Amino acid sequence: MADSTTPMDTPAAAEVASIASPINLILLALLIVLAYMRLRPAPPVTLPKGPPPTVFRTFTPPELKPFNGENSMPVYLAVRGRVFDVTAGRNFYGPGGPYENFAGRDASRGLASGSFDEDMLTKNLEGPLDKLEGLGPEEMDALRGWEERFSEKYLVVGKLVAVGSEGTG
């Protein structure tokens, strides 16, 4: 009788030993880790911080001059009385760029004539705005093309008026 109980106990013990084998424990641990990774809560999504709000304002030439990209300032330029924020194109319009002379200034005459020289800019910032007199039809068409391009690509942040006419109009 002692022999008859031993064979019965041996298969049960062997069966228990096979469930708790090292490979089964490793697979169970792997299953738990995978389930945790799949079901754990995702970190909250954070949206990138947007640019500060831009308020449409009226600029005079001296007020526009500091917006030339130096000292971490944005880059603005004016075309036919409309002031554009061209900061996104800082490589072109900011310091060291090919159009840097236009930053913080009225670029209308220079863009119309295709000249990026300093002499295309109004010298007297306190004086009247450039009326664009003396420009031919082709130059005016070129200027309208530039203005269209700026309108499609950049935000209008204000209008340019002569010194002394900030309160009118």
Image (spheres, rainbow, N blue to C red):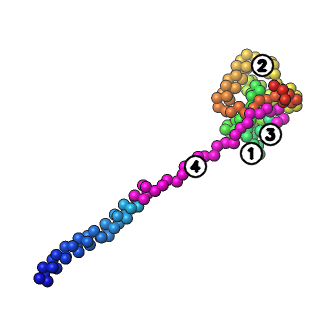
Q: Which residue is nearer to you in this view: 26 or 130?
A: 26
The local secondary structure at tag 2 comes to loop
> In the picture, residue 70 is in which quadrant?
top right
Residues at badges 2 and 1 in contact (C-beta under 8 Å)? no
Q: Report, in whole angstroms, how far the alpha carbon at label 4 lies from the one at label 1.
A: 26 Å
Three-letter amino acid code at the position of disc 2 = Leu
- The alpha-carbon separation of the residues under discs 2 and 3 comes to 28 Å
Question: Which numbered tag is attached to residue 87?
Answer: none
Name the amino acid type tagged 3: Pro
Q: Position of residue 91 (x, y in %)?
A: 68, 39
Residue range corresponding to the magenta coloring? 34-63
Residue 40, position as x, y percentages in the image? 46, 56
Q: Quick one: quadrant of the C terminus?
A: top right
Residue at the spot of label 3? 66
Which secondary structure, mark 3? Answer: loop
Q: Residues within 10 Å of mark 2 (few under 14, many from 20)?
A: some
Q: Which residue is mark 2?
A: 135
Would you say the residues marked 3 and 1 are in contact, meaning their CB atoms lie under 8 Å apart?
no
Which residue carries the number 1 mark?
Answer: 72
The residue shown at (23%, 75%) is 13
Of discs 2 and 3, which sits in the foreground? 3
> For the residue marked with disc 1, what is the amino acid?
Ser
**Label whose residue precedes the other's in the sequence (2 or 4):** 4
Is 67 covered by the magenta stretch? no
Q: Which residue is mark 4?
A: 46
Nearest the viewer among 163 and 136 is: 163
Q: Which quadrant holds residue 69? A: top right
The three-letter code of the residue at mark 4 reads Thr
Q: Is residue 48 visible?
A: yes
